[in-house]
Each structure stands twice: as C-alpha cells, then as structure tokens.
Amino acid sequence: MSTGIAASELILNARGAVYHLDVRPEEIAHTIITVGDPERVQNVSKHFDRIEGTYQHREFVTHTGFVGNTRISVVSTGIGTDNIDIVLNELDALVNIDFNTRQVKEELVSLRIVRLGTSGSLQEDIPVDAFVASSHAIGLDNLLPYYTWHNTPEELQLLEAFRGQVRLQPHAARPYLFEAAPELLERFGEGFHTGITVTCPGFYAPQGRQLRGALSHPQLIGQLGAFSFENRHITNFEMETSGIYGLGRVLGHRCLSLSAIVANRVRGEFSADGNAAVEKLIATALPIIAA
C-alpha cells in the first residue's frame, strides 16, 4: 500500500494548510478568481455579499465568500508563471488530494478558474481600457515544458502557424499553446474583444521594451501583431495566462483569462486610470462568473 505523497513534496503547515497559500481544503471554493496584485483581492471581495474567511502568506492572499448562492475564492498570484505553478498546483491539491492520507482522491474536482488581470494590446484597434477574453494562450515562458500534456489537433495547427510566422532567437523559448475552456469563453462575448494572448517571461525585453539593455528580438511586437491564421489574431500579451491554461489542461481544470487593456503598444499609449479599468472589469465579470 502506498504511503502517500511525501512531506517534502506536499508541504503542509502547522494548522494543516497548504504551504504557500496557507489555506485548508474547507477554506477554498470550487470557483476561483485569480488576480496578480494582492491588493486587488479586496477590490474583488468588496463585491461579495458575504466574506467567509481571509488568509495570507507572502504575496498570496485569499478571500472566500459568496455572491448570491455562489461560493467564490479570489486568490492573488503575484507576477509570472513561476507563481502560477505554485498557485495552480496548490489549488488542485486542496480539492484533489486527501491531506490526511496524502493520497490522490478517487473522484476528482474540476475547478472553474478565471483570471482578472491587466494586459497590453498588440492591435491598434483595441484601445486602452478595453477588455479582452483570451481564446487561446501562447507561452513564451519555460513552465509547461516541465510537464506532460496533450494538445488538440486545432491547437497544434495554430501553434505550428505561430512558429512559422514569429521567428524567435534560437533557444529563446519553446512556444506552447492551449485554448480556454469553451463553456467559460462563450459567456464573455458582449463588451469583450476575443483573441490569442501571448504570455511573456518578463516585462521589459520579453515584451519588446528597451530601456538600456539591447533587444535580441527588436521585431517582436510587429511580428506578434501581424500574426494571422484562419482569421485568428494575437490581441494582447501579459505574464500569467499560458501557465493558467497549461496547468488547467494538465490538472483537469476549466480556465479563462480576462484582461483590462492598460497599454496599447502599437500606439504607444498607456491608460490614464488603469485602476478604474480594472474596477470596471471586476464589476462586469463578477456577476457573470457567479451566475
């Protein structure tokens, strides 16, 4: 008989909570909203009808409560897919591993995970303060190559087209691609642009910004914006979506990323009030998530 997952692999703290999130299984909902900024958690939970519990460890803040009869947890991830690796794995452990026996449960739970974040537009006609729902995510980070997964035929076609049109420097990245959960994406049509989101492993050179460090790929923004395959285009880029979609596929969760556009990289514009744009995104998306 298996002794279960070792203490060094699944780390629980003194109160029996998973290590980084500091949350116990009964303290997390099956509908999850992720935000990057820890301060943004309360901007979401202030719209809850009732807050059941609040938890914090490092940059990971969790508020669990109710919108109507729907129980929701909002969790901050911090920046980047390295943090997404922590958050998605620990959320999965909370619902799919028995913390007493350290065994994977026989009946697995598929979480609904919706990212509410910020992003930069790569299309001139998607202005600052607009909203984007990510139909697919292309990862230029290095997280998912550490996992095993399977793509759909459509995903493989789209990925092959991307590799053919966007020429990265040798060894710069191993692009990967996953689609959003269709049943979530279809709920965010009105008021949202829809397109492919690219996830970058940094904010400056990986997103084509040059301060003092010279760029190895100065044509990146133009190539991303010009990509086209069967009427699909790259609308925006940010730093988390590919990790969420990829680990959602690996672990069996349904994921969607929604972004408020705070920069238009083609026009060189930045939102005059990005916080207001995010607040509008929260107010627009939360009733749909809770419905």
Image (spheres, rainbow, N blue to C red):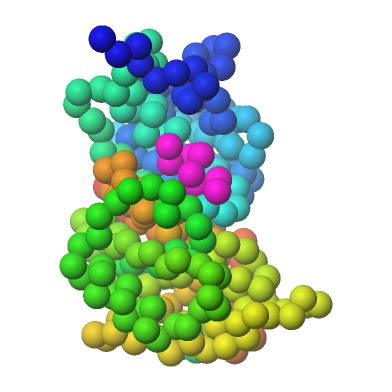
Residue shown at 40%/86% (left/top)? 165
Residue 240, percent across and down? 50, 57
Residue 67 on the magenta span:
no
Relative horizontal placement of residue 86, taking residue 148 as reference (left or right): right
Foreground: 154 or 275? Answer: 154
- In the displayed structure, would residue 175 be above or below residue 91? below
Q: Quadrant of residue 104?
A: top left
Foreground: 32 or 77? Answer: 77
- In the displayed structure, would residue 52 be above or below residue 214? above
Most distant residue in the right direction: 212
Residue shown at 55%/70% (left/top)? 172
Foreground: 250 or 128? Answer: 250
Does the image show residue 119?
no
Residue shown at 52%/34% (left/top)? 62
Relative horizontal placement of residue 210, taking residue 161 as reference (left or right): right
How many tags in the picture?
A: 0
Residue 76, percent across and down? 55, 43
Q: Quadrant of residue 178?
A: bottom left
Residue 81, percent across and down? 52, 52
- In the displayed structure, would residue 166 be above or below residue 17? below
Q: Quadrant of residue 221?
A: bottom right
Does the image show residue 136?
yes
- In the displayed structure, would residue 34 be above or below residue 105? below
- Screen quadrant of the N terminus: top left
Residue shown at 38%/78% (left/top)? 163
Magenta-highlighted residues: 82-89
Magenta segment's dominant SS is helix
Residue 136, percent across and down? 34, 67
